[in-house]
Image (cartoon, rainbow, N blue to C red):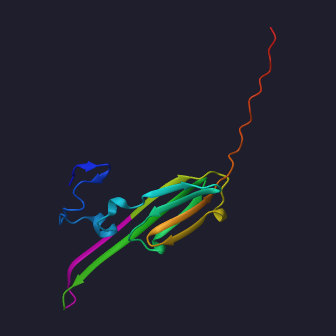
Amino acid sequence: MLLPSIFGENLFDDWMDFSFPSIDKALYGKRSHNVMKTDVKETENGYELDIDLPGFKKDEVNAQLENGYLKIEAAKNVNNDEKDKNGKYIRRERYAGTMSRSFYVGDGVSQEEIHAKFEDGILKLAIPKKDPKKVEEKKYIAIEG
């Protein structure tokens, strides 16, 4: 259901809750629109990223560095099996979902230099600053004529 929004958030989220089934709600909770919000802070020596991953556990989050890009991926599986007293299925539902974000950190940063910590649903990353390679200044030759 599309509802009007103000500043990117749903106007009716806090005081109106519809009971329609939603895969996002089953996977990520009623605040699924807040998943993977990221704060980036520049420090003297590098950058600090705080990525919100509410409802996720440490083993459901993966971070990798490839070709200068830091990719954060979170995957979740939900399995709702309900059986009656005789063991017959009344309902079986399975959901799976994955989300990811990428950040360019530069080719000079190595995997060993990035420090990560997952605590209280927040992935904290410390990434060092690297001096960008200086581009050689063009030198022109004077042409006489």
Task: Residue 13: name its quadrant.
Answer: bottom left
Q: Is residue 135 left or right of residue 36?
A: right
Q: Quadrant of the N terminus?
A: bottom left
In the rendered structure, does residue 95 fall within the stretch colored magenta? yes
In the rendered image, the residue lying farthest to the bottom is 86
Q: Residue at x 39, y 68 (%)?
A: 54
Q: Quadrant of residue 88?
A: bottom left
**Quick one: 81 or 9, which is closer to the camera?**
9
| Residue 24: image location, x then y, percent | 30, 64
| Residue drawn 49% across the image and 62% down it | 50
Percent of width and height locating residue 137? 74, 32
- Magenta residues, dominant SS class: strand
Tell me what residue is drawn at x 19 percent, y 91 percent. 85
Q: Is residue 141 left or right of residue 111?
A: right
- Residues shaded magenta: 86-97
Horizontal placement of 59 versus 69: left or right?
Answer: left
Residue 37 shown in magenta: no
Image coordinates of residue 56 in percent, x first then y, are 41, 71
Q: Quadrant of residue 82?
A: bottom left
Position of residue 145 measured from the top left corner of the image (x, y, whole percent)? 80, 8
